[in-house]
Image (cartoon, grey):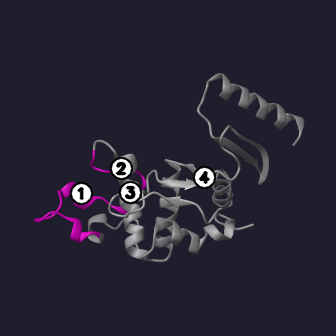
């Protein structure tokens, strides 16, 4: 790493420490090269971390893969996939109108919690259409090819559905591999 990057990374670390941020660690990649990495006690390179909202990106990726396979359409109404969950007499008309695209962009008819509930419903959809846990589906489709760790997992709700809005637990390096894939437009290597 050249001095320019060393100075910038050192400055960033000092800033984080001065703000007393509760950090586990970080990795910085530039053009595919690891230019900065640090872990705070008691975390290390092989530690699993709860990734919270990054999980939404994995849920979106799984949804996009299903769309590419023709198993769903982004403008499909979500209620059509879960008739068994609808109240007797049907859902509220606004709910009936919500599409998969609406959930992906968190444009739902709800005032609050759409930042996790929309993604959670999409994770349930992925699992319903694939018959697999969402992370297992992603492993099969792409994650193994980018070296995603096998010990990573997604926390489940009380019904056994992957928490698609906040449940991913993985290594920081797992995120780097999938981020590079996305930055390259889905092209491996």
Question: Which residue is found at the position 31% from the left and 42% from the top?
Answer: 112
Task: Say whether marks 1 and 4 touch (CB < 8 Å).
Answer: no
**Left-right relation of 181 to 90:** right
Q: Where are the magenta residues, as a range?
A: 82-110
Measure the C-alpha gap from mark 1 to mark 2. Answer: 11 Å
Visible residue check, residue 8: yes
Residue 107: numbered disc? 2
Mark 3 or mark 1, earlier in chain: 1
Mark 1 or mark 4, earlier in chain: 4
Measure the C-alpha gap from mark 2 to mark 4. Answer: 31 Å
Residue 41 screen position, x and y as percent = 67, 38
Residue 120: numbered disc? 3
Q: In the image, is residue 4 above or below residue 68?
A: above
SS under mark 3:
helix
Residue 181 screen position, x and y as percent = 66, 61
Q: Name the residue under label 4.
A: 48
């Amino acid at each position: 790493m050249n001095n320019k990057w060393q100075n910038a990374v050192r400055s960033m670390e000092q800033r984080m420490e001065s703000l007393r941020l509760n950090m586990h660690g970080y990795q910085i990649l530039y053009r595919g090269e690891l230019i900065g990495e640090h872990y705070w006690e008691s975390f290390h390179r092989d530690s699993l971390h709860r990734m919270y909202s990054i999980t939404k990106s994995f849920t979106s990726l799984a949804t996009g893969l299903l769309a590419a396979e023709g198993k769903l359409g982004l403008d499909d109404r979500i209620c059509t996939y879960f008739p068994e969950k609808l109240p007797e007499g049907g859902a509220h008309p606004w709910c009936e109108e919500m599409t998969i695209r609406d959930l992906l962009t968190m444009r739902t008819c709800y005032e609050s919690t759409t930042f996790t509930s929309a993604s959670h419903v999409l994770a349930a959809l992925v699992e319903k259409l694939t018959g697999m846990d969402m992370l297992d589906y992603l492993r099969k489709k792409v994650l193994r090819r980018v070296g995603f760790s096998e010990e990573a997992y997604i926390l489940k709700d009380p019904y056994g559905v992957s928490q698609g809005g906040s449940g991913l637990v993985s290594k920081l390096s797992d995120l780097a591999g999938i981020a590079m894939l996305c930055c390259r437009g889905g092209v491996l290597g």
